[in-house]
Amino acid sequence: MFPPAYPSLKEQMMKLVVNGEEIESSGSSLPDLLVQMGASPKRVAVMVNGTVISAAERQAVTLRAGDRIEILTFAAGG
Amino acid sequence: MKPLVLGDLEFQSRLLLGTGKFSSSAVMLEAVKASGAQIVTVALRRFNRERPSDDLLGPLMTLKNITLMPNTSGARDAAEAVKAARLARELCGSRLIKVEIHPNPHHLLPDPIETYEAAKILAADGFIVMPYMPPDPVLAKRLEEAGCASVMPLGSTIGSGNGIAAGGLLDIIINNSNVPVIVDAGLRAPSEAAAAMEAGCAAVLVNSAIAAAGNPSAMAQAFAAAVQAGSAAYEAGLMARSTTAAATSPLTLFLG
Amino acid sequence: MDNPSQYWSLAQAINTAASRADNRQIFSAMGAQRPGPRELALMLQPQARAHLEQMAARAKSLTARHFGNTVSLYAPLYLSNYCSSGCVYCGYASDRKQPRRKLPFDAVARELDALKREGFEEILLLTGERTPQADFEYVQACVRMASELFPQVQVEAFPMTVDEYRKLNLAGCVGVTLYQETYHPVVYDMMHRWGPKKDFAGRVSAPAHVLEAGMRTVGMGVLLGLSDPVVDSIALYLHAEELRKKYWRSGIAISFPRIRPQEGGFQPAHPVEDRLLAQIVFAFRIVMPDVPLVLSTREKPSFRDGMAGVGISRMSAASRTTVGGYAGAPAEDRGQFEVSDRRSVMEICDMLQAKKIEPVFKNWDAVYTG
């Protein structure tokens, strides 16, 4: 067995609920999470624990374990 | 033709298009172009990295002269609809919002009480509120007083293609409204859109009838022509229906 | 509208456009699906006079559809003939030599009793413009007294503030009648020589204040004869439509007062003959099918009989336009205008029933508002 390359990172991993699914995330900032999820920042709207977060506010939000995040996009609809 | 005025926005086209139920977003884009519509509706959905084609914002932004009107579908009450509206505004910057609250997934009929509550909050928050509503003349006035920029009574249930089922009620709504009346949902044929415009509607919102047509772009064009014809007919003033009421005895003899 | 003189200018433009109409356009207006100002103007043109019989037939069928074969009856009760304004055409103008009186409360009670005994359930309390003798508190007190006896009390007095109308409503008044007289700002100014009634803008905004205060109905009208009656009628319609759409919980009634000979010898500049008055009433019925249209005893019996149910759905009856006229006013008093139809309530009822029209004295009780 190899020792973990970056033992300190494991401590930073936390569980989040994104779009109803539990995921492990390494970053604690919203922009990092969007990158991790593969979302283009300008094409999505974000809600954290039921609060709408504007694009300008994203940087200032610190995510905590257990946070519920919704990432939304426009789809077809009438 | 006079412009369609919604809040502080003006539009030349009186045909609004929904983007649902098309076979692909390419077909949808072609139909939007063919329709000449300047307002198209979109819905909010959870982002899914496996299905990047879900995202319509990119493709729609390639079209010129288009204003997005996000809807709040999926919201089951006023609080959810308000949240959806604020998310949508974040995403596209458009203040136009179609308030659409239909808790029942089968008939998709709007909840008038939650719709009214959401409309009040959103109008106060600076949105240009466009409520999808049952064809109820009293509710229409209440929504107007709540600050809505328009009222959008359904012709018949969403996707049903049953046309304008309650024409008498629609007529009362138009006759009493100070805001544009837009028929939303239920239309099947361009002739129905023309009839709505002839009756004095300010615009119509069409989705299924175009998306589910044999040739969506061609149908979009047909609807655009019908809306234009109906609107021109309304402006021109329709000929009267015959009102021959044969009086048994003259009513004006007393005037000498 | 933003500016009170806009009703007149817009009405004038609509009338000018309609004046070029041919027969076919006029006929089309009569049967329009949703007639508006344009159709009203078309039906009021001189060319439309040829279709008066068809207009009457349509007016009659619409009146029957919305009101049944009924005409509701009410009585006016003059509380005071003190006045602070100088309206050229009015018998109660403040420069007229005329005994002035205000009914003391015991006399109000006697008048109310007399009307109740005649069978009335709806009354209209009238005063002149605001004076220290007949001020708001006096009108309010009379409304309170009247509402003890009558299920429907209405007031025709001076323009009030929204707050005053609210208080009047609480006192038991369900409706206010307030005629614009004319929408022509210049003629209005000439006709109303002094006093509070000179305020044209204040007059125009008063009906909105009535409805803002939550009154059930507002009665509107122009005094036909002061200005071009066709343009004034169109302006009145524009105003009424605006109020109907804004204050959608309330109702509107339209009256058709036409200038009658007065003491002081005022002659109207635009006399309105019977056929034109009938034409105006029929046209209003066609464009406002569900609105009560009112005809007073200013009009002579033959005209009232002919119009009852053919557009007209509400009438005053057995009116005295003198202060204290029902329970004994001095014979030398002159009324505000000359009553032409002096028939008793019984005679009016007989006339209506002979035409197979039911006279209605009471429409509803305000059960939930007390």
Image (tube, coloured by chain):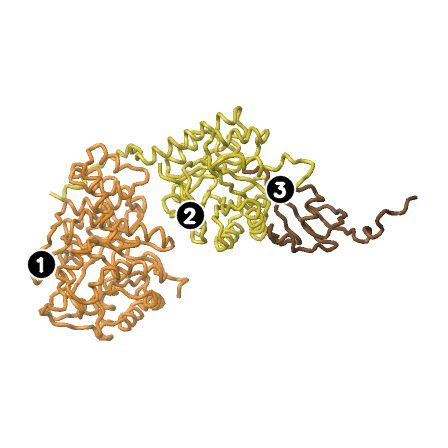
Above/below status of C274 relative to A77: below
Q: Which label sits in the foreground, 1 or 3?
A: 3
Q: Which chain is brown?
A: A
Quadrant placement of the N terminus of chain A: top right
Q: Which chain is yellow?
A: B
Q: Residue furthest front?
A: A5
Above/below status of B217 relative to C92: above
Task: Identify the residue under disc 3.
Answer: B45
Task: Identify the residue under disc 1.
Answer: C266
Residue B86 shows which numbered tag?
none
Q: Residues within 10 Å of mark 3 (few under 14, many from 20)?
A: many
**Separation of disc 2 and disc 1 at Cα?**
51 Å
Question: Residue B75 placed where, x, y %?
Answer: 59, 47
Question: Can see residue C154?
Answer: yes
**Separation of disc 2 and disc 3 at Cα?**
28 Å
The amino acid on which the numbered mark 3 sits, given as a three-letter code, is Arg
Task: Identify the residue under disc 2.
Answer: B8
Query: Going 12% across and 50% down the picture, which residue do you hit?
Result: C270
The amino acid on which the numbered mark 1 sits, given as a three-letter code, is Phe
As helix, strand or loop, the secondary structure at mark 1 comes to loop
